[in-house]
Each structure stands twice: as structure tokens, then as C-alpha cells.
Amino acid sequence: MATFAKPENALKRAEELINVGQKQAALQALHDLITSRRYRAWQKTLERIMFKYVELCVDMRRGRFAKDGLIQYRIVCEQVNVSSLEEVIKHFLHLSTEKAEQARTQAQALEEALDVDDLEADKRPEDLMLSYVSGEKGKDRSDRELVTPWFKFLWETYRTVLEILRNNSKLEALYAMTAHRAFQFCKQYKRKTEFRRLCEIIRNHLANLNKYKDQRDKPDLSLPESLQLYLDTRFEQLKVAMDLELWQEAFRSVEDIHGSAW
């Protein structure tokens, strides 16, 4: 793929591979192309390649590939067309969220289908044996097999996006939006461990922001717009901490707010 003179040809070849069921080959080829830095100047075709790339990453749950590609794409376009990076990341978030929701819906449908009076009529013998031996209910198995992998991928998506967007004033609004969505994910699914990690991730990002004050295009919290985004995120963090009854994390959130306000 990296030998193609035009990115249009590389994208066409990837689509051909996908059409014959070679998704892994298409993903690897696009990954090699993007990370080779062959195309350093932004162009619309590169955006189309990235859309196809993140679609493959989500479809195959390749979080590491997604992060590598987004880092390289940020280098290409953050100074000349940051809106393109935003669109690709929004697409990535949308696809990951959609897959997780589909898995949850499918698991719920499976649980309802198994919730019958005559187990022998609706369950296979091997299913009954597994439940007796392991003590695992149908919902537990469906969650483990269908939901958990996609929820893990969605959580990894939030972490990746926050890492890509941190320390850039042109991307701070999208960073704040992603943080809010990650907070809501933790609240909706009672993910206390992930919520603590999320709070720590955001604190570390702020600490690094203050540490490297000479970094180009870094957010400036002395500006009212930037400070407001930061405070909105912290207040949302506080609300979710209280909803999850994580009182120590709520107290730390208050300290975060107080420190930024003064």
C-alpha cells in the first residue's frame, strides 16, 4: 500500500480487499500507509482513508491500530485542518458507542428469549449443563460473551481520544465533550473503577499542561472560554462522583474546582 503514488489508489485497493473478505489485510495495509508518513500534506482523500480505517478498527476491535493511526493523522492535519481530525474522531466515537449499544441490546434480547418456564424446550442440553456446573446465569454469559468485549473497546476508545486531544487549544471543546461522554458511560453502567481512572487521567493531563507551559497551541486556562470548559468538565465529574457514591473522589473533584478557580 505504501508504494502507491496516489492515496486514491491505496483506498481503492483496501476496498477491494474488504469486498473479498480480507478485512485484516485491508486494515494492515491502511495502517502501514498511514504510519509510513508518506503523505505529510493534508488532502481530502486522506480523510476518506481515515474514515475507512477507523471503521475497520472498530469492526475488528483493534484499539492499538486506531490509536496509532489517529496520532499520525493528528500530525498531518492539526496545523492546517483540525476540523478534519475532529470529524474522524467523532466518527470513531460514534461507531464505538453504536457497537457497544448493539451488543447490549442483543444481550438483553437473548436474556429475554431464555427467560421461559420450560427450560428443556428452549435451552440446549449443553447450556443447562454449563449453568449447573458454573452457576452462571444466561445473562451473565451473554454479558461476558457479547457485551463485555465491546464495553472494553468503548472504554479504550474514550482513553485513546482523550490522549489524542489533550494539550491542544484547537481541540479542547472536543476533549471536554469526550470527557463528559466518558463520565456518562461510567454513570450509566456503574463503572466505579473506570470512573476513578478517568478522573486520574484528566488530572494527569492538566498536570502535564502546567508542566510544559511553552508547548505550542496548548490550552490557556487564563482565557475565559478555556477555563469555562475546564470547570464544566470538573462539575460534571463532581456530579457523577456523587451519583456513584464515590465520596472521596467527589471531595477530590471539589479540590480540583477550587484549585482552578483560585
Image (tube, rainbow, N blue to C red):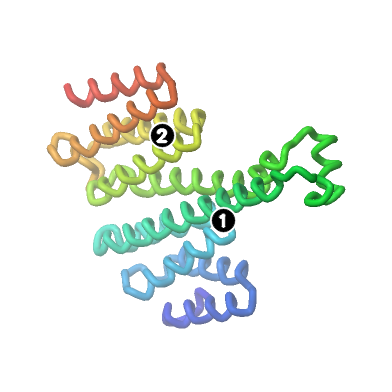
Q: Is residue 257 above or below residue 233?
A: above
Task: Give the x, y percent position of residue 160.
Answer: 44, 47
- Which SS class for mark 2? helix
Q: Is residue 30 above or below residue 155?
A: below
Left or right of 69? Residue 216 is left
Determine which quarter of the picture holds residue 138. top right
For the residue marked with disc 2, what is the amino acid? Ile
Considering the image in quadrants, where does the C terminus appear?
A: top left
**Residue 39's x, y, as percent?**
39, 71
Secondary structure of the residue carrying numbered label 1: loop
Q: How many marks?
A: 2
**In the rendered view, does 13 fall on the left or right side of 239?**
right
Q: Position of residue 44 (x, y in %)?
A: 33, 74
Q: Which residue is mark 1?
A: 62
Image point 25% across, 43% down: which residue? 215
First in sequence, mark 1 or 2: give its number: 1
Quadrant of residue 88 in the image?
bottom left
Question: Residue sitting at 43 percent across and 34 percent down?
Answer: 187
Q: 127 or 227, which is in the foreground?
A: 127
Give the image quarter of residue 183.
Answer: top left
Label 1, label 2: how many angstroms apart (C-alpha)? Answer: 22 Å
Task: Relative to 198, say whether 16 is above or below.
Answer: below
Q: Residue at x 45, y 31 (%)?
A: 195
Is residue 67 in sight in this rendering?
no
Which residue appears farthest toward the front when viewing the image? 117
> 166 or 244, which lies in front?
244
- Asked if residue 126 is positioned above or below residue 137 in the image, the reply reads below
Q: Which mark is residue 201?
A: 2
Q: Amino acid at mark 1?
A: Arg
Sort mark 1 into few (<14), some (14-19) or many (20+) by Cα contacts within 10 Å.
some
Residue at x-position 67% and y-position 41%: 139
| Residue 259: image tag | none
